[in-house]
Image (cartoon, helix red, strand yellow):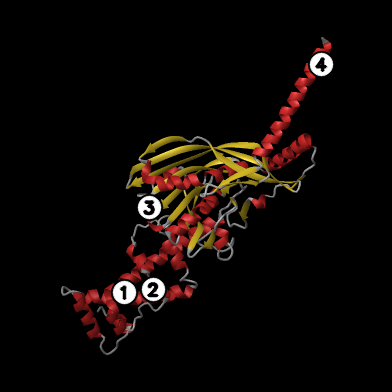
């Protein structure tokens, strides 16, 4: 009886060993081949030599809603489960980390006329595999543990000692350093298209001198991605702030989650279809609001680079900094105040040029557009309004333009002096117009100074009570 029991025991142990051997070999075989099928119905097997032994599960959530005025006319949201396998590529008895994401069955939470935002839904779904890989690689220990585990498998099953290449973060991530904002970090998943077509290096703002863009990337024919500081808000979250901004009405808003340093955060994307423009809003714990903006040259380049833009968007996050002082924001607030004053002066200048006319200004030798400060682009004229929110709506349009035109104090002094001359002419015209209109006033003013056609003549008239 005892001999029979030992006999069956040996059979069972042998069976278990065979099952483990076949399971290990089968597992390796399943992940070491790749099937390629062409349109000509020809199948081809290529050895890829990969084995996966770690799995990270994550859920990708996003919501897309479209506004028509203040009314939401389309609303769609979903949760996409993602299974990201961490494994190793095998070559010459050496193991190198590799990743693979598999999408599970999605859960559509809301679909209220989502067909109107199909393009945005497709755009977000395209980033899902990358999102899974970002979650899986937030911690280097996952990849290094995979290497260690796979090495042990080969030793135990095949008695093979494999070499390992420790995971180097730079293979998957890039980092933008020397940012002018102490609590801001930018570490993004490797880009696919932009590096092939980038123009020069990434431009980073100085820590000592304010520049409009915190960082800027120029690429393609005429495409640009840049980050700007917008404003500081308090007692309000980013969602409520967004709802209160008139500039974002009639837009498509995408709300989604992002993970940095294993912390989950909310992110908002605003898309402007007409201008091939998209921006992502961020807010740190201190209420500082930033916008990452992508302006594409055309719809084709927009579609080509949008995935890289989203990787950059996911890579921006904030850390705790003791005694944090946002000097960049302070420099910008100073710049905005100066910009407001300049814009007010330019508006006065532009108005008086229209009222006085080139004929009268030339008559009294008062220059028109004699200085770059006088030039107001047509697109600025069209959207001019006394109640502009310079911090949010037209900050880049107005201040970035005039900041470049005013390098010295002397320029402003010349401008103010010429503006004072025009205000003097305007006062004279009004004085001599009476009830007969501005043309009559202009003619009488010319007549009064026909022997001295200069601004000093007008000043003498004023000193004498006109």
Q: CA distance from mark 4 to mark 2?
A: 103 Å
Q: Which residue is mark 3?
A: 247
- Which residue is found at the position 21% from the left and 75% from the top? 438
Callout in the foreground (3, 4): 4
Position of residue 79 in the picture relative to residue 374 (left or right): right
Q: CA distance from mark 1 to mark 3?
A: 30 Å
Q: CA distance from mark 3 to mark 4?
A: 82 Å
Q: In terms of secondary structure, where does tag 1 sit?
A: helix
Marks 4,1: beta carbons within 8 A: no
Q: In terms of secondary structure, where does tag 2 sit?
A: helix
Marks 2,1: beta carbons within 8 A: yes
- Which residue is found at the position 32% from the left and 64% from the top? 382
Identify the mark nearer the N-term, 4 or 2: 4
Q: In terms of secondary structure, where does tag 3 sit?
A: helix
Callout in the foreground (3, 2): 3
Check disc 2: other Cα within 10 Å, few if <14, some if 14-19, many if 20+.
Answer: some
Q: CA distance from mark 2 to mark 1?
A: 10 Å
Q: Which residue is mark 4?
A: 6
Q: Please give the label number shown on residue 374.
A: 2
For residue 88, what is the image quadrant?
top right
Residue 248 visible, this angle: yes
Looking at the image, residue 398 lies above or below residue 131? below
Check disc 1: other Cα within 10 Å, few if <14, some if 14-19, many if 20+.
Answer: many
Q: In terms of secondary structure, where does tag 4 sit?
A: helix
Identify the mark nearer the N-term, 1 or 3: 3
For residue 138, what is the image quadrant?
top right
Identify the mark nearer the N-term, 3 or 2: 3
Q: Which residue is mark 1?
A: 353
Quadrant where the C terminus lies?
Answer: bottom left
Q: CA distance from mark 4 to mark 1?
A: 109 Å
């Amino acid at each position: 009886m005892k001999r029979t029991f030992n006999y069956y025991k040996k059979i069972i142990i042998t069976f278990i060993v065979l099952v483990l051997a076949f399971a290990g070999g089968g597992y390796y075989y399943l992940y070491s081949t790749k099937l390629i099928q062409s349109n000509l119905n020809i199948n081809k097997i290529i050895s890829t030599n990969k084995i996966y032994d770690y799995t990270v599960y994550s859920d990708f959530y996003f919501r897309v809603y479209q506004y028509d005025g203040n009314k939401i006319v389309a609303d769609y949201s979903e949760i996409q489960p993602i299974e990201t396998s961490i494994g190793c590529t095998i070559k010459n008895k050496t193991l190198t980390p590799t990743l693979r994401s598999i999408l599970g069955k999605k859960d559509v939470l809301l679909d209220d006329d989502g067909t109107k935002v199909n393009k945005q839904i497709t755009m977000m779904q395209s980033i899902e595999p990358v999102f899974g890989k970002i979650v899986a690689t937030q911690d280097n220990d996952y990849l290094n543990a995979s290497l260690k585990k796979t090495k042990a498998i080969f030793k135990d099953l095949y008695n093979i000692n494999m070499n390992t290449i420790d995971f180097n973060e730079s293979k998957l991530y890039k980092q933008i350093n020397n940012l002018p904002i102490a609590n801001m970090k930018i570490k993004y998943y490797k880009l696919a298209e932009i590096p092939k077509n980038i123009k020069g290096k990434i431009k980073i703002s100085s820590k000592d001198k304010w520049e409009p863009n915190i960082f800027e990337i120029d690429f393609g024919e005429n495409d640009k991605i840049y980050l700007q500081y917008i404003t500081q808000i308090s007692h309000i979250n980013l969602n409520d702030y967004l709802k209160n901004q008139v500039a974002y009405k009639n837009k498509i808003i995408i709300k989604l989650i992002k993970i940095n340093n294993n912390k989950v955060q909310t992110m908002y994307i605003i898309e402007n279809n007409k201008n091939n423009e998209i921006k992502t809003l961020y807010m740190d714990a201190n209420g500082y609001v930033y916008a990452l903006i992508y302006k594409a040259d055309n719809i084709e380049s927009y579609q080509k680079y949008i995935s890289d833009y989203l990787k950059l968007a996911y890579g921006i996050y904030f850390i705790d900094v003791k005694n944090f002082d946002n000097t960049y924001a302070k420099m910008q607030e100073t710049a905005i105040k100066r910009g407001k004053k300049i814009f007010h002066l330019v508006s006065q200048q532009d108005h008086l040029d229209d009222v006085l006319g080139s004929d009268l200004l030339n008559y009294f030798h008062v220059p028109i557009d004699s200085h770059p400060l006088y030039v107001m682009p047509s697109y600025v004229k069209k959207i001019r309004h006394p109640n502009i929110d310079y911090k949010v709506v037209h900050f880049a349009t107005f201040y970035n333009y005039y900041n470049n035109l005013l390098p010295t104090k002397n320029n402003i002094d010349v401008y103010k002096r010429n503006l004072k001359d025009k205000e003097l002419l305007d006062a004279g015209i009004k004085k001599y117009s009476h009830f007969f209109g501005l043309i009559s006033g202009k003619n009488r003013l010319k007549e009064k100074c026909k022997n001295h056609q200069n601004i000093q003549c007008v000043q003498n008239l004023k000193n004498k009570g006109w």
